[in-house]
Amino acid sequence: MERKLYEKIVMNHKPKERRLRNAIVSFIVGGLVGVLGEFLLELYSYYLNISSSDAAVFMMVTLIFLASLFTALGFFDKLVNKARCGLIVPITGFAHSMTSAAIEFRREGFVTGLGANIFKLAGTVILYGIVSAYIFGIIRYFLLGGI
Amino acid sequence: MTNQYNNVYLDTVATVVGPFEHEGPLSKRFDRSYKDLYMNEDSFESAEIHLMKESIDILLDKKNIIKDKIDLLVAGDLQNQITSACYTALKYNIPFLGLYAACATNTEGIIVASNLIDSNKINNSIVSVSSHNMVSERQFRNPTEYGAPKPSSATFTATGGAACLLTNEKTSIRVESSTIGRVVDMNQSDPNNMGANMAAAAADTIYRHLTNLQREPSYYDLIVTGDLGMFGKDILIECMQKEYHMDLSKNYNDCGIMLYDTENQKEVQAGGSGPVCSALVMYGDIVPKMKNKELKRVLYVATGALFNPTLVFQKENILSIAHAVSLEVVE
């Protein structure tokens, strides 16, 4: 059978993904996570009487904790599946990827399993986050004189 | 290569399934089902081994035969280095052949056992397969608790164990012939569209089977493929029409679609997959219908994507294969 003909038939039967709908859902959910973050930020800086940069750290820790807890309780993957990038792009996605890998590889031991694999998904984010931080830092230094 | 057999019969079948298969349309047809994916074991890998062992236990129990009367165990699964099959074989301590043809393992097993029985080398053989959704997710995709969104062409690995007993003693269903498939590469590399990877292999095997035996598709009451899913099914029908001028639209279905209620079980996306998927539908639905004489001639074409995550990341194509077995009711 000709590969070209086969590829044409495959293209005829390729289901269309609902990209616009997914984008809107992600936008709304991602926005809501942002609203929750802002709310926590205000809450902590007001009630704990701390600076907003300290409150930002508290806020991030809270979101990471919630995402990890919900992953461990077993329903966060279903939410991510529905909300897609709305929960993957914020810091909740980072926490989810690490906790899910930690749960997954716990059975293979703390060193050979959990330790070796916890960054299986998050490692990419960390590596390229650091690399791009260097690149943008250098650009900023030369173009803006380090401001 | 197509072989015809004179004295190979399908005797008893046994099936054990997980929760998603239990919620599907064939739920009452399975011998045993679990509501939990762990099957009372510590890990998903052990759970899959449990499923395969249990299917063989049920088979021996139903047939009321002791394991020492079985000449050969032929088994395979999706776990790395087919470990479910190996750990199962250890329990029964009978001669064992382990096979890997991804989701086409069940028909490959039936072909191997049938050839040995037909040539009078052995009297009977158990053929068993298993797969576990979580084991496959973990091995081929992401951690099981990670909620990566999947496209609608993705298929869902079935959880279960299935076993059948092939023998040279006459029963109501005989293994009439088989066609051994060829490895096919159609320049496909999307692991989330297995139907498109495997439909070409199914088309090749079905065409060679029918032409070697000078048959038309209408010779069979039913032609079933293993796990092409709803999009792969359409691709196969169009391929057979355009390339080989054969009409499959009337008597053809796919086990991946038959195993689940694709309308209400949205998590299965395009349908079921895995070696056990086609075995569960064959033994749970089609074989009982043959025993009742509702179906008399069935062509069972299990399809396998011979894919390895490492090679997919290295931008190699996904290869596929399909093996066909023809079953007939003994008049």
Image: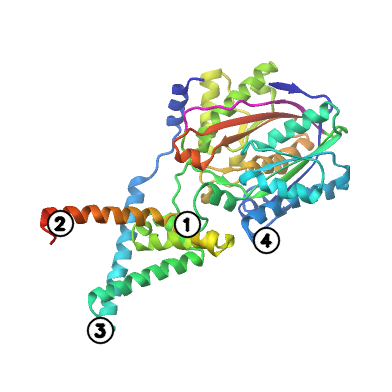
For label 1, the crowd category at 10 Å Cα-Cα, with few meaning under 14, some 14 to 19 and many 20 or more, is: many
Q: Does the segment drawn in magenta span residue B185?
A: yes
Q: Is residue B247 visible?
A: yes
User: The residue marked by circle 2 belongs to what chain?
Assistant: A
Q: Which residues are magenta?
A: B173-188
Residue nearest the observer in this picture, B268 or B5 = B5
Disc on res. B270: none
Residue nearest the observer in this picture, B34 or A63 = A63
**Which residue bears the numbered disc 4?**
B41
- Relative vertical location of residue A72 with respect to residue B11 in this rendering, above or below: below
The spot of residue A70 in percent (x, y) is: 46, 67
Q: Nearer the viewer, mark 1 or mark 2?
A: 2
Pointers 2 and 3 in contact (C-beta within 8 Å): no
Residue in the picture at 32% in, 74% down: A58
- Relative vertical location of residue B99 with respect to residue A90 in this rendering, above or below: above
Residue nearest the observer in this picture, A98 or A28 = A98
Same subunit under labels 2 and 3? yes
**Which residue bears the numbered disc 1?**
B146
The spot of residue A127 in percent (x, y) is: 35, 54
Q: CA distance from mark 1 to mark 2?
A: 38 Å
Assign a secondary structure to mark 4.
loop
Pointers 1 and 2 in contact (C-beta within 8 Å): no
